[in-house]
């Protein structure tokens, strides 16, 4: 067993040189199934002898690998009929449906790339994103299309394919269809037929650094940017998971509700499982109780979803639904997006354990720019509760650096940087931002500047404390908001905290607080009790925080924090909500 005090892995004291995480992969068999392949080639190669097995389950429809391959080829021929060729971008605006999966692999087959846009983009930005990558074909889910319809009526050169969300299910007979009334609009079923007389499309061979997909940054620290990922970003990633001890086996299943405009949805809960012969059980709806019902229905070995979905296991009606039911099938419950508190994790794991699940909640760390996964928690070793696991085998090396790009030693806090085999190619048409994201060291090695602050433990596990930009300047002194939040959350009365400057007075800090349920109930019955809790909290902060200016005297209580369309906390909304602020001098 690894010992932090006596580790032979610590040789120089610098993590990127010592690579102490390698010890956790000793003895793990290498398979290398997907190196030098495209998603299409890898999918076919590993599943061609399993055509009758179910690949996708979607609202009662079960689609075999044979049917999956057939539909991919039909979509590929129709795309070519519309003039899509090697190197082109095709825009997709939809939740995960079987048709979106067909399109992703069809684009891989013909050498084109998917430009995947969230339906929450403003209309003017949507058109700009399409023009930026010269996309002439746009596939729209029918539910999202009306919002953008008018802008496309002014651009007849762009062909719009309208996809009914329930197209693959019997529910299509009961769903209201959008009437096609423009010359550049085409229904999915018409689209899929136009390639019938086309000859079979040729398979684009693997090409290193070939663009495959573009997703978009959340825009929390500036304008949203198009992040271009290559075939290697997808294939090296899923190959690395297979070589890192992740027990993925043909015939198992994964619960999928992460939309494809999040890279984790496209890469880790579509391409990863299907390539390995794992069935995808899709339900794109974000409802906590429905999530629990579906987990009991599908019995997935793997779940990758937003952290807030797992809170569904603690709902009273969910506990009733779970009564007498087993969750022993669940092996890998991964969470992402909004971070769960330690108490939330404890409560969720308690429910899972009560119902026979031996797995613990799993976390990780990554960014779209660095290829989804940097570190992960999939080994049998239990790292510290604050850590986000270790670098995924073969594809990532981590280090923490000072402002002059000098590497720091274990436990020293600084800027987290990553050498990644699966990082983005570029921010599309944004050379300045691309060059700013990457750092080339004295050896010519390329590092991703994540923009996050943290440190590395002697066992190689990474602790991410917050965004470097998440800071405030109070009376001329810079303080990290996440340090104050961590101090606030040491209180047993506080569930979660968000610290921001006052929108009308940037020299004042506001601690936005969600109280623990029992405290919230007490305050609800006796509002003046809140002052007592706040005074106790403020007193403890004076002892915990070094800078007096970092101790807030403005507080705002919430029942829960709002979530933005990105799946993360809606910080902009929180910051401007100042009506219920209480002041303590």
Image: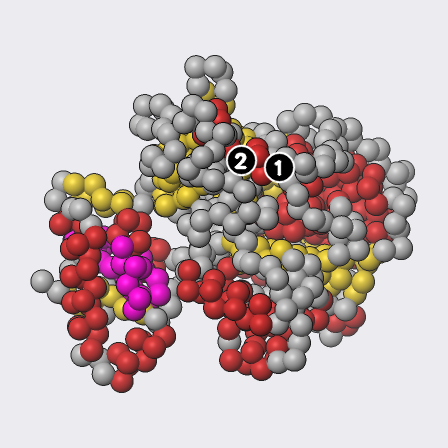
**Residue at image location 54% in from the left, 71% down from the top:** 351
In the picture provided, is 52 more to the left or to the right than 249?
Answer: right
Mark 2: which secondary structure?
helix
Mark 1: which secondary structure?
helix
Quadrant of the drawing holding the N terminus? top right
Q: Would you place residue 72 above or below residue 579 in this image? A: above
Extreme bottom residue here? 525
- Is residue 159 at all visible to an observer of this figure? no
Which residue bears the numbered disc 2?
A: 21
Q: Would you place residue 177 above or below residue 208 in this image? A: below
Q: Is 476 in the magenta?
A: no
Q: Position of residue 309 (x, y in %)?
A: 53, 65
Which residue bears the numbered disc 1?
A: 25
Mark 2 near mark 1, Cβ–Cβ under 8 Å? yes
Q: Position of residue 196 (x, y in %)?
A: 88, 47
Write down the region rendered in magenta.
Answer: 487-514
Q: Position of residue 303 (x, y in %)?
A: 62, 58
Quadrant of the drawing holding the C terminus? bottom left
As rendered, which of 213 and 272 lies closer to the eye?
272
**Residue at image location 31% in from the left, 76% down from the top:** 520
As rendered, which of 317 and 451 lies closer to the eye?
317
In the picture provided, is 45 more to the left or to the right than 489?
Answer: right
């Amino acid at each position: 067993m690894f010992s932090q005090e006596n580790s032979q892995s610590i040789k120089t004291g610098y993590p990127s040189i010592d690579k102490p995480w390698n010890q956790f992969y000793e003895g793990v068999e290498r398979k290398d199934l997907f190196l030098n392949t495209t998603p299409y080639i890898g999918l076919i190669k590993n599943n061609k002898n399993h055509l009758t097995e179910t690949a996708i389950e979607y609202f009662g429809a079960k689609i075999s690998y044979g049917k999956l391959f057939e539909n991919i080829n039909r979509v590929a021929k129709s795309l070519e009929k519309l003039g899509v060729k090697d190197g082109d971008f095709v825009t997709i605006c939809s939740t995960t449906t079987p048709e979106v999966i067909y399109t992703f692999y069809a684009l891989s087959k013909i050498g084109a790339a998917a430009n995947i846009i969230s339906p929450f983009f403003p209309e003017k930005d949507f058109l700009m994103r399409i023009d930026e990558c010269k996309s002439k074909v746009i596939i729209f889910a029918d539910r999202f299309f009306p919002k953008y319809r008018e802008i496309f009526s002014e651009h007849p050169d762009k062909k719009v394919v309208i996809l009914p969300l329930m197209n693959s299910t019997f529910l299509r007979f009961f769903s209201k269809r959008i009437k096609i009334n423009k010359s550049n609009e085409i229904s999915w079923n018409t689209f899929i037929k136009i390639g019938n007389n086309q000859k079979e499309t040729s398979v684009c061979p693997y090409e290193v650094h070939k663009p495959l997909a573009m997703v978009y940054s959340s825009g929390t620290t500036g304008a949203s940017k198009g992040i271009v990922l290559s075939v290697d970003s997808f294939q090296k990633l899923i190959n690395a998971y297979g070589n890192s001890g992740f027990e993925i086996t043909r015939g198992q299943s994964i619960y999928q509700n992460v939309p494809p405009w999040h890279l984790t949805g496209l890469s880790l809960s579509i391409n990863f499982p299907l390539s390995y012969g794992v069935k995808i059980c899709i339900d794109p709806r974000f409802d906590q109780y429905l999530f629990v019902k579906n987990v009991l229905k599908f019995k997935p070995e793997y779940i990758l979803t937003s952290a807030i979905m797992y809170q569904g296991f603690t709902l009273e009606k969910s506990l009733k639904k779970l009564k007498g039911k087993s969750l022993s099938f669940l092996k890998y419950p991964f969470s992402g997006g909004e971070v769960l508190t330690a108490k939330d994790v404890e409560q969720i794991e308690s429910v899972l354990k009560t119902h026979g699940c031996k797995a613990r909640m799993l976390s990780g760390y990554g960014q779209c720019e660095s290829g989804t996964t940097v570190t992960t928690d999939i080994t049998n070793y239990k790292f510290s509760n604050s850590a986000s696991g270790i670098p995924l085998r073969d594809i990532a090396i981590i280090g923490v650096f000072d402002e002059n790009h000098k590497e720091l030693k274990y436990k020293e806090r600084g800027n987290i940087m990553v050498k990644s085999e699966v990082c983005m190619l570029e921010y599309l048409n944004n050379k300045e931002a691309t060059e700013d994201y990457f750092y080339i060291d004295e050896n010519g090695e390329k590092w991703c500047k994540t923009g996050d602050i943290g440190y590395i433990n002697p066992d190689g596990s990474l602790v991410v404390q917050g965004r470097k930009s998440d800071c405030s300047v109070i009376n001329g002194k810079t303080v990290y908001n996440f340090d104050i939040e961590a101090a606030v959350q040491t209180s047993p009365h506080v569930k979660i905290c968000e610290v921001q400057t006052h929108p009308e007075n940037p020299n004042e800090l506001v601690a936005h607080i969600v109280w623990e349920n029992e405290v919230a109930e007490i305050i609800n019955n006796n509002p003046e009790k809140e002052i007592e809790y706040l005074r106790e909290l403020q007193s403890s902060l004076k002892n915990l925080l070094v800078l007096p200016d970092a101790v807030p005297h403005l507080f705002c209580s919430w029942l829960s924090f709002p979530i933005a369309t990105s799946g993360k906390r809606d910080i902009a909304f929180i910051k401007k909500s100042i009506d219920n602020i209480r002041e303590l001098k």
